[in-house]
């Protein structure tokens, strides 16, 4: 199949689980982190700024779990410890750090994929979305699973490879390769996606 354009139709920026802990370098959030984890997530602010400038809708996601641990399911069976727990200082979405605005959208989730058990599909239909642009973490978990569900729902999916962060460098790289396998040209540097978003506004004018 031919490589698809960077942005097809109406784009939406999805900010996956960039929470206060991403800006607290000494905070133990219960999740393994790759080198450059913090740098990559902080860099995602540039994507948010570009989406605001280009008037592209932004959906912020926050993974959050109840204090009695009832909604973790099987999430603690692997390498992850208790994380994103309600009431902990690292759990709130990084609203100030990422310049989340009243005009942006915000969704809680209890599982890894942004599609699973949330209102995302309804919101995307309302926005008439065609292309989903992903930033956030973890590359190999929540970003990857969201990408796959978006792909299976027939969205064009793109990921800013320097604005996502994984549990390890190897897992990060493998997840990016897996996403690129599903949609050729999906994995791009943020500079290219920023240029594409700003250019999309000019094309729409």
Image (tube, rainbow, N blue to C red):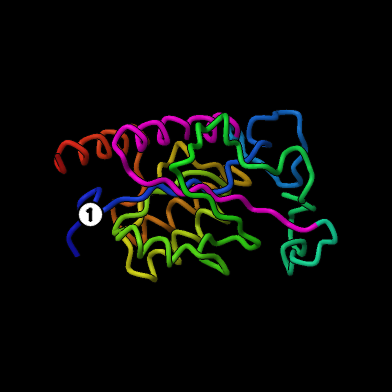
Q: Please give left or right for residue 119 compared with residue 201 in the image.
A: right
Q: Is residue 50 part of the magenta span, yes or no?
A: yes
Q: Residue at x 25, y 34 (%)?
A: 198
Q: Which residue is mark 1?
A: 8
Quarter of the image for the N terminus: give it.
Answer: bottom left
Place of residue 14 in the rendered image (x, y in percent of width and height, measured from the top left): 45, 49
Looking at the rendered structure, the number of numbered marks drawn on it comes to: 1
Q: Image height check: is 79 above or below 56? A: below
Q: Secondary structure at mark 1?
A: loop
**For this rendering, which residue is in front, 161 or 113?**
113
Q: Residue furthest front?
A: 102
Q: Residue at x 85, y 61 (%)?
A: 68
Quarter of the image for the C terminus: give it.
Answer: top left
Q: Please give left or right for residue 108 compared with residue 30 in the image.
A: left
Place of residue 34 in the rendered image (x, y in percent of width and height, measured from the top left): 62, 39
**For this rendering, which residue is in front, 193 or 14?**
14
Query: Which segment did they paint magenta?
Result: 38-66
How busy is the neighbourhood of tag 1: few (under 14 within 10 Å), some, or many (20 plus)? some
Place of residue 188 in the rendered image (x, y in percent of width and height, measured from the top left): 34, 42
Q: Is residue 92 part of the magenta span, yes or no?
A: no
């Amino acid at each position: 199949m031919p490589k698809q354009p960077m942005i097809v139709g109406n784009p939406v920026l999805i900010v996956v689980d960039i929470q206060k802990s991403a800006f607290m370098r000494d905070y133990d959030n219960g999740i393994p982190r790759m080198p450059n984890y913090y740098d990559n997530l902080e860099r995602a602010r540039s994507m948010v700024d570009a989406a605001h400038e280009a008037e592209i809708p932004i959906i912020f996601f926050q993974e959050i779990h109840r204090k009695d641990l009832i909604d973790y399911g099987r999430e603690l069976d692997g390498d992850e410890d208790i994380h994103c727990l309600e009431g902990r200082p690292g759990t709130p979405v990084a609203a100030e750090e990422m310049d989340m605005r009243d005009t942006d959208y915000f969704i809680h989730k209890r599982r890894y994929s942004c599609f699973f058990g949330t209102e995302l599909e309804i919101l995307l239909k309302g926005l008439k979305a065609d292309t989903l642009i992903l930033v956030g973490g973890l590359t190999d978990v929540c970003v990857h699973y969201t990408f796959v569900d978006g792909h299976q729902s027939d969205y064009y999916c793109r990921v800013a490879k320097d604005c996502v962060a994984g549990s390890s460098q190897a897992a990060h790289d493998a997840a990016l390769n897996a996403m690129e396998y599903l949609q050729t040209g999906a994995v791009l540097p943020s500079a290219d996606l920023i240029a594409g978003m700003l250019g999309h506004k000019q094309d729409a004018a």
